[in-house]
């Protein structure tokens, strides 16, 4: 009986921690709507057409702050196109680089 309860607790921990990240077409949203989504969810994937080749769809993960980045990454300002702004400011995770002497 104890084993069964322990197994249920462990499985429940995995199920609750596995959250799906939302995906949105940024050019169908206003800049304020993009900010609201990222603020509410902490992170979201935004898709948008390439500026150089509009038939190519680009996408990336944008975050509320560095705490949503992986270890060794930090949040840095980037821009994406939205319905009302060609360059909506958002935060994106970038790899930290260290200079060696």
Image (cartoon, rainbow, N blue to C red):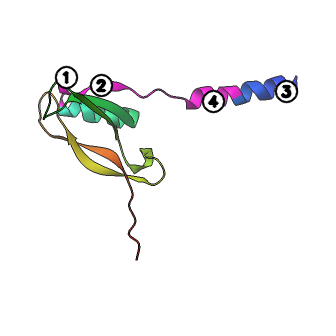
Residue sitting at x 85%, y 27%? 3
Q: Are marks 1 and 2 in contact (CB under 8 Å)?
A: yes
In the image, residue 53 lies in the stretch drawn in magenta: no
Describe the element under mark 1 as helix, strand or loop.
helix
In the image, residue 19 lies in the stretch drawn in magenta: yes
- Tell me which numbered mark, 4 or 2, is placed earlier along the sequence: 4
**Position of 39 compared to 51: left or right?**
right
- Tell me which numbered mark, 3 or 1, is placed earlier along the sequence: 3
Q: Which residue is mark 4?
A: 14
Residue sitting at x 46%, y 47%? 70
**Position of 11 compared to 92: left or right?**
right
Where residue 50 sits: x, y (%)?
Answer: 18, 32
Residue sitting at x 38%, y 26%? 22
Where residue 76 sits: x, y (%)?
Answer: 30, 51
Question: Which dot marks residue 24?
Answer: 2
**How far apart in space, not on screen, are marks 4 and 2 (Cα)?**
26 Å
- Tell me which numbered mark, 4 or 1, is placed earlier along the sequence: 4
Question: Which dot marks residue 70?
Answer: none
**Position of 99 compared to 79: left or right?**
right
**How far apart in space, not on screen, are marks 3 and 1 (Cα)?**
50 Å
Describe the element under mark 3 as helix, strand or loop.
helix
For the record, the magenta segment spans 11-30
Describe the element under mark 4 as helix, strand or loop.
helix
Describe the element under mark 2 as helix, strand or loop.
strand
Q: Which residue is mark 1?
A: 28
**How far apart in space, not on screen, are marks 4 and 1 (Cα)?**
34 Å
Q: Which residue is mark 3?
A: 3
**How far apart in space, not on screen, are marks 1 and 2 (Cα)?**
8 Å
- Tell me which numbered mark, 3 or 4, is placed earlier along the sequence: 3
């Amino acid at each position: 009986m104890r084993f069964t309860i322990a197994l249920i607790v462990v499985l429940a921990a995995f199920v609750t921690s596995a959250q799906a990240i939302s995906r949105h077409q940024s050019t169908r949203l206003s800049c304020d709507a993009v900010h609201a989504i990222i603020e509410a969810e902490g992170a979201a994937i935004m898709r948008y057409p390439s500026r150089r080749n509009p038939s190519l769809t680009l996408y990336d993960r944008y975050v509320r702050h560095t705490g949503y980045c992986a270890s060794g990454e930090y949040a840095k300002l980037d821009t994406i196109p939205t319905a009302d702004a060609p360059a909506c400011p958002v935060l994106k995770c970038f790899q930290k680089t260290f200079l060696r002497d």
